[in-house]
Protein backbone atom coordinates (compact mmCIF):
# COMPACT_ATOMS: atom_id res chain seq x y z
CA UNK A 1 0.00 0.00 0.00
CA UNK A 2 2.84 2.41 0.86
CA UNK A 3 4.53 1.77 -2.49
CA UNK A 4 1.19 2.31 -4.23
CA UNK A 5 0.77 5.66 -2.51
CA UNK A 6 4.31 6.72 -3.47
CA UNK A 7 3.55 5.81 -7.09
CA UNK A 8 0.39 7.88 -7.04
CA UNK A 9 2.23 10.87 -5.57
CA UNK A 10 5.06 10.58 -8.12
CA UNK A 11 2.60 10.32 -10.99
CA UNK A 12 0.73 13.35 -9.71
CA UNK A 13 3.96 15.36 -9.49
CA UNK A 14 4.97 14.48 -13.03
CA UNK A 15 1.52 15.35 -14.30
CA UNK A 16 1.62 18.66 -12.45
CA UNK A 17 4.94 19.60 -14.00
CA UNK A 18 3.72 18.81 -17.50
CA UNK A 19 0.35 20.50 -17.08
CA UNK A 20 1.30 23.27 -14.69
CA UNK A 21 0.99 26.19 -17.09
CA UNK A 22 -2.03 24.88 -18.99
CA UNK A 23 -0.08 23.77 -22.00
CA UNK A 24 3.47 22.42 -21.73
CA UNK A 25 2.72 20.40 -24.86
CA UNK A 26 2.35 23.53 -26.97
CA UNK A 27 6.10 23.83 -27.50
CA UNK A 28 8.22 22.40 -30.28
CA UNK A 29 11.06 19.95 -29.60
CA UNK A 30 14.45 21.52 -30.28
CA UNK A 31 17.81 20.00 -31.03
CA UNK A 32 20.62 21.84 -29.29
CA UNK A 33 23.29 23.34 -31.52
CA UNK A 34 26.50 21.61 -30.48
CA UNK A 35 29.98 21.12 -31.82
CA UNK A 36 32.57 23.52 -33.20
CA UNK A 37 31.75 26.78 -34.98
CA UNK A 38 30.94 26.94 -38.73
CA UNK A 39 34.00 26.64 -40.93
CA UNK A 40 35.97 24.50 -38.46
CA UNK A 41 36.99 21.91 -41.07
CA UNK A 42 38.75 24.55 -43.19
CA UNK A 43 40.31 26.05 -40.06
CA UNK A 44 41.74 22.69 -39.00
CA UNK A 45 43.18 22.13 -42.49
CA UNK A 46 44.83 25.58 -42.62
CA UNK A 47 48.65 25.41 -42.49
CA UNK A 48 49.24 28.96 -43.75
CA UNK A 49 51.15 29.81 -40.57
CA UNK A 50 53.33 26.73 -40.85
CA UNK A 51 51.68 25.04 -37.85
CA UNK A 52 48.37 23.73 -36.59
CA UNK A 53 45.79 26.22 -35.40
CA UNK A 54 44.07 25.71 -32.02
CA UNK A 55 41.37 23.08 -32.27
CA UNK A 56 37.98 24.81 -31.98
CA UNK A 57 36.53 21.93 -29.93
CA UNK A 58 39.41 20.97 -27.66
CA UNK A 59 41.47 24.12 -27.08
CA UNK A 60 40.56 26.01 -23.93
CA UNK A 61 39.78 29.75 -24.13
CA UNK A 62 43.04 30.40 -22.26
CA UNK A 63 44.99 28.44 -24.90
CA UNK A 64 43.21 30.29 -27.70
CA UNK A 65 44.01 33.64 -26.08
CA UNK A 66 47.68 32.71 -25.69
CA UNK A 67 47.85 31.63 -29.34
CA UNK A 68 46.47 34.93 -30.63
CA UNK A 69 48.67 36.98 -28.30
CA UNK A 70 51.68 35.36 -29.95
CA UNK A 71 50.66 36.33 -33.50
CA UNK A 72 51.68 39.48 -35.36
CA UNK A 73 48.76 41.72 -36.26
CA UNK A 74 48.98 40.82 -39.95
CA UNK A 75 48.58 37.11 -39.21
CA UNK A 76 45.65 37.78 -36.87
CA UNK A 77 43.85 39.70 -39.60
CA UNK A 78 44.63 37.04 -42.19
CA UNK A 79 42.98 34.36 -40.05
CA UNK A 80 40.02 36.64 -39.36
CA UNK A 81 39.34 37.14 -43.05
CA UNK A 82 40.00 33.53 -44.02
CA UNK A 83 37.91 32.00 -41.23
CA UNK A 84 35.33 34.49 -39.93
CA UNK A 85 32.99 31.75 -38.70
CA UNK A 86 35.64 30.33 -36.38
CA UNK A 87 37.36 33.54 -35.27
CA UNK A 88 34.01 35.20 -34.55
CA UNK A 89 32.77 32.40 -32.30
CA UNK A 90 35.92 31.12 -30.62
CA UNK A 91 36.09 32.09 -26.95
CA UNK A 92 39.53 33.46 -26.15
CA UNK A 93 39.94 35.35 -29.44
CA UNK A 94 40.49 39.09 -28.83
CA UNK A 95 37.23 41.03 -28.76
CA UNK A 96 38.08 43.40 -31.63
CA UNK A 97 38.87 40.47 -33.94
CA UNK A 98 35.57 38.78 -33.06
CA UNK A 99 33.69 41.96 -33.90
CA UNK A 100 35.41 42.14 -37.29
CA UNK A 101 34.96 38.46 -38.06
CA UNK A 102 31.27 38.51 -37.21
CA UNK A 103 30.73 41.66 -39.25
CA UNK A 104 32.14 39.78 -42.24
CA UNK A 105 29.96 36.75 -41.49
CA UNK A 106 26.67 38.65 -41.20
CA UNK A 107 27.36 40.65 -44.37
CA UNK A 108 27.51 37.34 -46.22
CA UNK A 109 24.08 36.26 -44.91
CA UNK A 110 21.12 38.28 -46.21
CA UNK A 111 18.98 37.30 -43.22
CA UNK A 112 21.30 39.04 -40.79
CA UNK A 113 23.09 41.67 -42.88
CA UNK A 114 21.38 44.40 -40.81
CA UNK A 115 23.64 43.38 -37.91
CA UNK A 116 26.86 44.20 -39.77
CA UNK A 117 27.55 47.36 -37.78
CA UNK A 118 26.74 45.81 -34.41
CA UNK A 119 29.38 44.65 -31.94
CA UNK A 120 28.84 40.92 -32.19
CA UNK A 121 30.81 38.67 -29.90
CA UNK A 122 29.28 35.61 -31.56
CA UNK A 123 27.25 34.79 -34.64
CA UNK A 124 26.23 31.31 -35.75
CA UNK A 125 23.54 31.16 -38.48
CA UNK A 126 22.93 27.43 -38.17
CA UNK A 127 19.45 26.33 -37.15
CA UNK A 128 17.48 29.16 -35.53
CA UNK A 129 20.75 31.08 -35.17
CA UNK A 130 22.73 32.27 -32.18
CA UNK A 131 24.16 35.70 -31.52
CA UNK A 132 25.79 37.70 -28.75
CA UNK A 133 25.82 41.49 -28.95
CA UNK A 134 27.88 43.83 -26.80
CA UNK A 135 26.57 47.18 -25.59
CA UNK A 136 29.44 49.38 -24.38
CA UNK A 137 33.21 49.01 -24.21
CA UNK A 138 33.71 45.41 -23.11
CA UNK A 139 37.50 45.50 -23.11
CA UNK A 140 37.91 48.53 -20.88
CA UNK A 141 34.83 48.62 -18.65
CA UNK A 142 35.35 47.84 -14.96
CA UNK A 143 31.75 46.59 -14.75
CA UNK A 144 30.41 43.88 -17.06
CA UNK A 145 27.05 42.10 -17.21
CA UNK A 146 25.72 39.19 -19.24
CA UNK A 147 22.04 38.68 -20.05
CA UNK A 148 21.05 35.00 -20.40
CA UNK A 149 17.53 34.87 -21.88
CA UNK A 150 14.89 32.17 -21.69
CA UNK A 151 12.56 30.53 -24.21
CA UNK A 152 11.87 31.72 -27.75
CA UNK A 153 15.08 33.74 -28.11
CA UNK A 154 17.37 33.24 -31.11
CA UNK A 155 19.28 35.28 -33.70
CA UNK A 156 16.04 36.53 -35.20
CA UNK A 157 14.27 37.45 -31.96
CA UNK A 158 17.01 38.43 -29.51
CA UNK A 159 16.30 42.10 -30.34
CA UNK A 160 12.54 42.54 -30.62
CA UNK A 161 11.01 46.04 -30.62
CA UNK A 162 7.62 44.54 -29.77
CA UNK A 163 9.11 43.09 -26.56
CA UNK A 164 11.58 45.82 -25.56
CA UNK A 165 12.04 44.71 -21.95
CA UNK A 166 11.83 40.96 -22.47
CA UNK A 167 14.24 40.41 -25.36
CA UNK A 168 17.94 39.89 -24.65
CA UNK A 169 19.03 43.09 -26.40
CA UNK A 170 16.21 45.08 -24.83
CA UNK A 171 17.21 43.97 -21.34
CA UNK A 172 20.84 44.79 -22.12
CA UNK A 173 19.98 48.31 -23.27
CA UNK A 174 17.84 48.99 -20.21
CA UNK A 175 20.51 47.74 -17.81
CA UNK A 176 23.25 49.77 -19.46
CA UNK A 177 21.09 52.92 -19.35
CA UNK A 178 20.14 52.32 -15.72
CA UNK A 179 23.83 52.17 -14.75
CA UNK A 180 24.55 55.47 -16.47
CA UNK A 181 26.38 53.53 -19.18
CA UNK A 182 29.00 52.47 -16.64
CA UNK A 183 28.39 48.77 -17.33
CA UNK A 184 29.22 46.96 -20.57
CA UNK A 185 26.44 44.45 -21.22
CA UNK A 186 26.43 41.32 -23.37
CA UNK A 187 23.07 40.19 -24.73
CA UNK A 188 23.93 36.50 -24.96
CA UNK A 189 21.55 34.52 -27.18
CA UNK A 190 24.30 31.95 -27.39
CA UNK A 191 22.44 28.69 -26.85
CA UNK A 192 19.44 26.85 -28.30
CA UNK A 193 16.43 27.94 -26.25
CA UNK A 194 13.10 26.11 -25.94
CA UNK A 195 10.25 27.24 -28.14
CA UNK A 196 7.03 27.86 -26.26
CA UNK A 197 6.35 25.97 -23.04
CA UNK A 198 6.75 22.42 -24.31
CA UNK A 199 8.69 19.54 -22.83
CA UNK A 200 11.99 21.21 -23.76
CA UNK A 201 11.14 23.96 -21.27
CA UNK A 202 10.27 21.36 -18.61
CA UNK A 203 13.52 19.42 -18.98
CA UNK A 204 17.17 20.33 -18.69
CA UNK A 205 18.54 18.92 -21.95
CA UNK A 206 18.90 22.28 -23.73
CA UNK A 207 20.15 23.89 -20.54
CA UNK A 208 22.97 21.34 -20.20
CA UNK A 209 24.38 22.35 -23.59
CA UNK A 210 23.71 26.01 -22.88
CA UNK A 211 25.59 25.78 -19.59
CA UNK A 212 28.71 24.48 -21.33
CA UNK A 213 28.59 27.40 -23.77
CA UNK A 214 28.04 29.89 -20.95
CA UNK A 215 31.02 28.53 -19.01
CA UNK A 216 33.22 28.91 -22.10
CA UNK A 217 31.99 32.47 -22.52
CA UNK A 218 33.04 33.24 -18.94
CA UNK A 219 36.41 31.54 -19.44
CA UNK A 220 36.95 33.53 -22.63
CA UNK A 221 36.18 36.83 -20.92
CA UNK A 222 38.59 35.99 -18.11
CA UNK A 223 41.31 34.95 -20.60
CA UNK A 224 40.94 38.33 -22.29
CA UNK A 225 41.29 40.25 -19.04
CA UNK A 226 37.63 41.31 -18.98
CA UNK A 227 36.12 42.02 -15.57
CA UNK A 228 34.16 39.18 -13.95
CA UNK A 229 30.53 39.74 -14.96
CA UNK A 230 27.24 39.91 -13.16
CA UNK A 231 25.11 37.33 -14.97
CA UNK A 232 21.38 38.03 -15.25
CA UNK A 233 19.35 34.91 -15.97
CA UNK A 234 15.73 35.13 -17.13
CA UNK A 235 13.21 32.29 -17.01
CA UNK A 236 14.71 29.13 -18.61
CA UNK A 237 18.01 31.02 -18.69
CA UNK A 238 18.15 30.54 -14.93
CA UNK A 239 18.21 26.77 -15.49
CA UNK A 240 21.25 27.30 -17.71
CA UNK A 241 22.88 29.47 -15.05
CA UNK A 242 22.12 26.95 -12.32
CA UNK A 243 23.83 24.15 -14.22
CA UNK A 244 26.82 26.38 -15.03
CA UNK A 245 27.12 27.96 -11.58
CA UNK A 246 29.91 25.85 -10.08
CA UNK A 247 32.22 26.51 -13.07
CA UNK A 248 31.11 29.94 -14.24
CA UNK A 249 33.48 32.84 -13.61
CA UNK A 250 31.03 35.47 -12.36
CA UNK A 251 30.70 37.86 -9.43
CA UNK A 252 26.89 37.67 -9.35
CA UNK A 253 24.16 35.32 -10.50
CA UNK A 254 20.83 37.15 -10.69
CA UNK A 255 17.77 35.06 -11.56
CA UNK A 256 14.30 36.43 -12.25
CA UNK A 257 11.10 34.81 -13.43
CA UNK A 258 12.81 31.50 -12.69
CA UNK A 259 11.22 28.02 -12.88
CA UNK A 260 14.13 26.69 -10.77
CA UNK A 261 17.89 26.28 -11.03
CA UNK A 262 18.19 22.49 -10.71
CA UNK A 263 19.54 22.96 -7.20
CA UNK A 264 17.86 22.65 -3.82
CA UNK A 265 19.38 25.84 -2.45
CA UNK A 266 22.20 28.33 -2.93
CA UNK A 267 24.79 26.04 -1.31
CA UNK A 268 24.04 23.29 -3.83
CA UNK A 269 24.93 25.65 -6.69
CA UNK A 270 28.56 25.40 -5.59
CA UNK A 271 29.40 28.97 -6.56
CA UNK A 272 31.31 31.75 -4.84
CA UNK A 273 29.25 34.32 -6.75
CA UNK A 274 26.56 36.28 -4.95
CA UNK A 275 23.18 34.78 -5.82
CA UNK A 276 20.11 37.01 -6.15
CA UNK A 277 16.51 36.24 -7.07
CA UNK A 278 13.41 38.19 -8.07
CA UNK A 279 9.85 37.23 -8.89
CA UNK A 280 7.02 39.70 -9.33
CA UNK A 281 3.53 38.83 -8.05
CA UNK A 282 1.96 38.87 -11.53
CA UNK A 283 4.51 36.57 -13.19
CA UNK A 284 2.85 33.44 -14.64
CA UNK A 285 5.96 31.45 -13.71
CA UNK A 286 4.40 31.13 -10.24
CA UNK A 287 1.96 28.62 -11.76
CA UNK A 288 4.80 26.25 -12.65
CA UNK A 289 5.18 23.57 -9.93
CA UNK A 290 8.61 23.78 -8.31
CA UNK A 291 9.36 20.06 -8.39
CA UNK A 292 11.79 17.69 -10.07
CA UNK A 293 10.73 14.19 -11.01
CA UNK A 294 11.87 11.79 -13.76
CA UNK A 295 13.74 14.59 -15.52
CA UNK A 296 10.81 17.01 -15.46
CA UNK A 297 10.80 20.32 -13.58
CA UNK A 298 13.67 22.40 -12.26
CA UNK A 299 13.34 22.31 -8.48
CA UNK A 300 12.65 24.86 -5.76
CA UNK A 301 11.77 28.49 -6.43
CA UNK A 302 15.01 30.54 -6.16
CA UNK A 303 12.93 33.51 -4.95
CA UNK A 304 11.65 31.56 -1.93
CA UNK A 305 13.19 32.32 1.47
CA UNK A 306 14.20 28.67 1.86
CA UNK A 307 16.42 28.74 -1.23
CA UNK A 308 18.72 31.31 0.40
CA UNK A 309 19.28 33.78 -2.43
CA UNK A 310 19.52 37.51 -1.78
CA UNK A 311 16.17 39.20 -2.33
CA UNK A 312 15.62 41.56 -5.27
CA UNK A 313 12.45 43.71 -4.99
CA UNK A 314 10.11 43.24 -7.94
CA UNK A 315 6.76 44.33 -6.55
CA UNK A 316 6.08 46.79 -9.39
CA UNK A 317 7.30 44.69 -12.32
CA UNK A 318 4.51 43.41 -14.55
CA UNK A 319 4.24 39.91 -15.95
CA UNK A 320 7.03 37.59 -17.02
CA UNK A 321 8.89 40.16 -19.12
CA UNK A 322 8.59 43.33 -17.04
CA UNK A 323 11.64 43.13 -14.78
CA UNK A 324 13.70 45.56 -16.89
CA UNK A 325 10.92 48.07 -17.48
CA UNK A 326 12.11 51.65 -16.80
CA UNK A 327 11.35 52.95 -13.34
CA UNK A 328 10.82 49.55 -11.71
CA UNK A 329 12.38 48.59 -8.40
CA UNK A 330 13.81 45.46 -10.04
CA UNK A 331 15.69 47.44 -12.70
CA UNK A 332 17.09 49.82 -10.09
CA UNK A 333 18.24 46.84 -8.03
CA UNK A 334 19.77 45.13 -11.08
CA UNK A 335 21.74 48.29 -11.87
CA UNK A 336 22.99 48.56 -8.28
CA UNK A 337 24.06 44.90 -8.31
CA UNK A 338 26.03 45.29 -11.53
CA UNK A 339 27.82 48.34 -10.11
CA UNK A 340 28.77 46.70 -6.80
CA UNK A 341 32.38 45.70 -6.37
CA UNK A 342 33.76 42.36 -5.27
CA UNK A 343 33.26 41.61 -1.59
CA UNK A 344 30.61 44.27 -0.99
Image (spheres, rainbow, N blue to C red):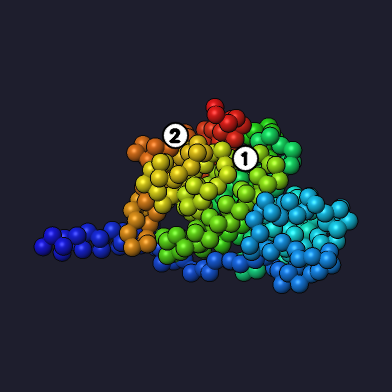
- List the residue tagged with mark 1: 228
Q: CA distance from mark 1 to mark 2?
A: 21 Å
Q: Is residue 339 above or below residue 265?
A: above
Quarter of the picture holding the N terminus: bottom left
Q: Secondary structure at mark 1?
A: loop
Q: Position of residue 328 (x, y in %)?
A: 54, 35
Label for residue 311? 2
Q: Position of residue 68 (x, y in %)?
A: 77, 53
Residue sitting farthest toward the left: 1
In-front residue for pair 129/315: 129
Q: Position of residue 230 (x, y in %)?
A: 58, 40
- Residue 288 in sight here: yes
- Residue 121 in sight here: no
In-front residue for pair 256/1: 1
In-front residue for pair 299/221: 221
Q: Secondary structure at mark 2?
A: strand
Q: Residue at x 34, y 38 (%)?
A: 306
Judge depth for marks 1 and 2 and give the one in front. 1
Q: Residue at x 45, y 34 (%)?
A: 310
Q: Position of residue 26 (x, y in %)?
A: 44, 66
Q: Quick one: label 1 or label 2, which is nearer the N terminus?
A: 1
Q: Are marks 1 and 2 in contact (CB under 8 Å)?
A: no
Number of numbered discs visible in the structure rendering: 2
In the displayed structure image, the side of residue 215 where residue 114 appears, left or right: right
In the displayed structure image, the side of residue 73 where residue 322 appears, left or right: left
Q: Is residue 34 above or below residue 189?
A: below
Quarter of the picture holding the C terminus: top right
Q: Residue at x 52, y 39 (%)?
A: 273
Amino acid sequence: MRRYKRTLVSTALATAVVAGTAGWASGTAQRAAEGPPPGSAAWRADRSLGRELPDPERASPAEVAAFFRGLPEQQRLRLTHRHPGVVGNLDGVPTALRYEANSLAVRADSRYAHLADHRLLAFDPRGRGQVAEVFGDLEHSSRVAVIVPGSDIDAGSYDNPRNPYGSAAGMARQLRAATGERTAVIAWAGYTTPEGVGLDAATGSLAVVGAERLVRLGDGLAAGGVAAPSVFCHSYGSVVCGLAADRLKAKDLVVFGSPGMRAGNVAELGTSARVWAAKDPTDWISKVPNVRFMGLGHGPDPASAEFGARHVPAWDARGHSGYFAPGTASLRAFAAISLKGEGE
